[in-house]
Image (cartoon, rainbow, N blue to C red):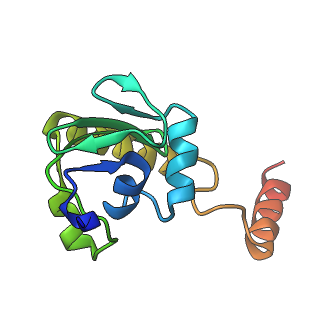
């Protein structure tokens, strides 16, 4: 009888969970169901089998990922080992970093970059407005 680790294919949701893209398989299944995950350029179901060499494109938090499957692991392992399961496209990684920086800069220039003002901050703002007006 063959062991599960000997099989050369694996369910997509299980692979995404084992590669640490999602915290649970249920989250992976949800994203796949919403069409945020594509394998070799086509939308797939949770039970889609992936094998070494497949290209997976996914969107997490509005950020693109394009990865090539380099290995299969049927158990969730530590992050350094999970990174060995895939190879990321450099162009997509650069695009993602650019988007992260744009998002970070847009938050800095917002009215309240650290969230809502505290009661103390609000009192200072009110005092400043009264003095100016």
Left-right relation of 11 to 112: left
Res 37 → quadrant: top left
Quadrant location, the N terminus? bottom left
User: Eyeballing the image, is 72 above or below 122?
Assistant: above
Residue 42 drawn above or below residue 14 = above
- Report the front residue among 9 and 77: 9
Q: Position of residue 103 (x, y in %)?
A: 44, 44
Judge left or right: residue 121 versus residue 102.
right
Residue 131 in percent (x, y) is at 81, 58
Q: Left or right: where does residue 130 sit relative to residue 74?
A: right
Which of 102 and 70 lies nearest the eye of the viewer? 70
Residue drawn at point x = 16 percent, y = 45 percent: 52
86 relative position to 132: left or right: left
Q: Nearer the viewer, residue 39 or 6?
A: 6
Q: Position of residue 104 (x, y in %)?
A: 43, 50
The residue at the point 40 percent across, 60 percent down is 17
Which residue of the protein is positioned furthest toward the top in this rendering? 42
Task: Identify which residue is drawn at 19% across, 71% down.
Answer: 81
Tell me which corner region of the image, top left, top right, bottom left or bottom right, holds residue 102: top left
**Numbered disc total:** 0
The residue depicted at 72 percent of the width and 65 percent of the height is 117
């Amino acid at each position: 009888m063959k062991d599960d680790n000997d099989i050369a294919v694996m369910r997509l949701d299980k692979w995404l969970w084992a590669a640490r893209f999602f915290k649970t398989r249920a989250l992976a299944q949800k994203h796949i169901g919403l069409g945020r995950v594509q394998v070799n350029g086509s939308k797939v179901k949770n039970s889609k089998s992936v094998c070494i060499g497949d290209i997976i494109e996914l969107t997490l938090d509005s950020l693109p990922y394009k990865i090539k499957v380099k290995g299969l692991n049927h158990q969730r392992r530590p992050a350094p080992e999970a990174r060995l399961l895939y190879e990321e496209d450099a162009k997509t990684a650069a695009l993602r970093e650019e988007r992260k920086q744009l998002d970070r800069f847009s938050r800095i220039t917002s009215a309240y970059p650290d969230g809502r003002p505290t009661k103390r901050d609000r009192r200072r703002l009110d005092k400043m407005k009264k003095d100016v007006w």
